[in-house]
Amino acid sequence: MKIIRLETFCNRFVGFTRLTAEDGSQGWGQVSTYNADITCEIFHRQVAPYALGRGIADLDDILAMINEKEHKFPGSYLRRAMTGLDTAVWDWRGKQAGKPVVSLLGGSPGKLRAYASSMKRDITPEDEAKRFLKLRDEKGFDAFKWRVGVETGRDQDEWPGRTEKVIPYVAKALGDGIDKLVDGNSCYSPKKAIEVGRMLEANGIGHFEEPCPYWEFEWTKQVADALSVDVAGGEQDCEFTAWKTMIGMRAVDIVQPDVMYLGGISRTLTVCKMAEAAGLPVTPHAANLSLVTMCTMHLLKAIPNAGKYLEFSIEEADYYPWQYGLFRGKPYRIEDGHAIISDAPGWGVEINPGWLEKSAYQVSEKA
């Protein structure tokens, strides 16, 4: 079955894609969030021309060809645009088979343990603990992640003393029987990261994400080697060369590919296999409630080296307003701390028609 039409519907934050095959059947996908309007331009100029007229079964070869033919443009934007094709193909495949994507990948729908992921730094330790406890009681979460330092912060803190207070305060408030995770978002030098890591060890926190600038693999390895806490990373890395280096030198204990940043499900599966060969677990980055979290849910239920949980954003509309109103109904449900993957075909979601009507539209078709 050949691809004859590729469409995008986007605003600055989110861009959905629609694939149409020669028999009129369709699949929906998404380019990566953030500057999605730019990514959609790249999708039509540097992705769609290689896919139109090709067989859907040729996805892996199409992705490889885009990489080869667009060799002067490696990096994030091209991979983010490729995701729009990949995820639409997987949705199409699921709908044609009458199965959820997770089943096509060798897994099965059902429950998946999730951790409540806070994106906030402009929040006091008291308020962070308060909302975590509320989510624990109302949604049954038994794992939480919060932020320390400043994103790419050169050893700085959101305000003086916040990190030293928020680590023990939230850890103590959550108490025993709760998995605790912390994210540095590329803030620290190795020396400072190890200092913060010692605080994590002392407070029963088992996961330290992206402690050093993500591109400094040697720095991150120093931290991982020094600490008993699991050091995690990889969300920003979109090229296989970076993954081969990171995994080969064991710079991290847990790998965290982002399906949307990396180029889609097919490319993420390649990274998962690299990690599996090295004996490393995969806990992907999925920091918003667009399609990325749904894709990650299907992936995690299918790979043999899945980590302990799914990242699940807890930010409300006042903080991430753009991630609401994307879908018809409520595709994301948390029950007893677990996300639910339905047995609906494809991704099991329907894009909100009202959202589509307000978006910028573009189409590429087979001449």
Image: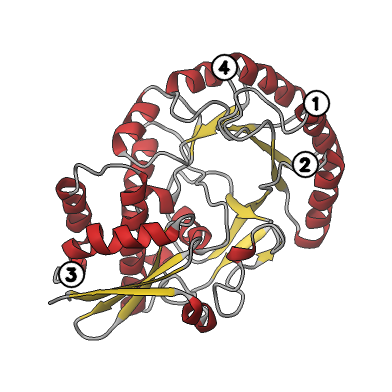
Q: Is residue 105 visible?
A: no
Q: Residue at x 70, y 46 (%)?
A: 120
Mark 3 highlights which residue? Answer: 52
Classed neighbour count for the residue bearing mark 4: other residues with Cα under 10 Å, few (<14), some (14–19), many (≥20)? many
Task: Measure how far apart labels 4 and 3 are at the Cα level.
Answer: 47 Å
Q: Quadrant of residue 110?
A: bottom right
- Tell me which amino acid carries mark 4: Pro
Q: Residue at x 60, y 79 (%)?
A: 329
Badge 2 vs badge 3, beta-carbon distance below 8 Å: no
Q: Residue at x 81, y 52 (%)?
A: 131
- Point out residue 252 in the picture as x, y percentages from the top left corner: 48, 28
Task: Measure how far apart labels 1 and 4 are at the Cα level.
Answer: 19 Å
Badge 2 vs badge 4, beta-carbon distance below 8 Å: no
Mark 1 highlights which residue? Answer: 161
Task: Measure how far apart labels 2 and 1 are at the Cα level.
Answer: 27 Å
Badge 1 vs badge 4, beta-carbon distance below 8 Å: no
Task: Give the mark toward the camera: 2 or 1.
Answer: 1
Task: Give the mark toward the camera: 2 or 3.
Answer: 3
- Tell me which amino acid carries mark 3: Leu
Badge 4 vs badge 3, beta-carbon distance below 8 Å: no
- Tell me which amino acid carries mark 1: Gly
- Point out residue 126 in the picture as x, y percentages from the top left corner: 87, 42
Q: Which of the marked residues, 4 or 3, is nearer the chain's N terminus?
A: 3
Classed neighbour count for the residue bearing mark 3: other residues with Cα under 10 Å, few (<14), some (14–19), many (≥20)? many
Task: Measure how far apart labels 2 and 4 are at the Cα level.
Answer: 30 Å
Q: Which of the marked residues, 3 or 1, is nearer the chain's N terminus?
A: 3
Q: Quadrant of the C terminus?
A: bottom left
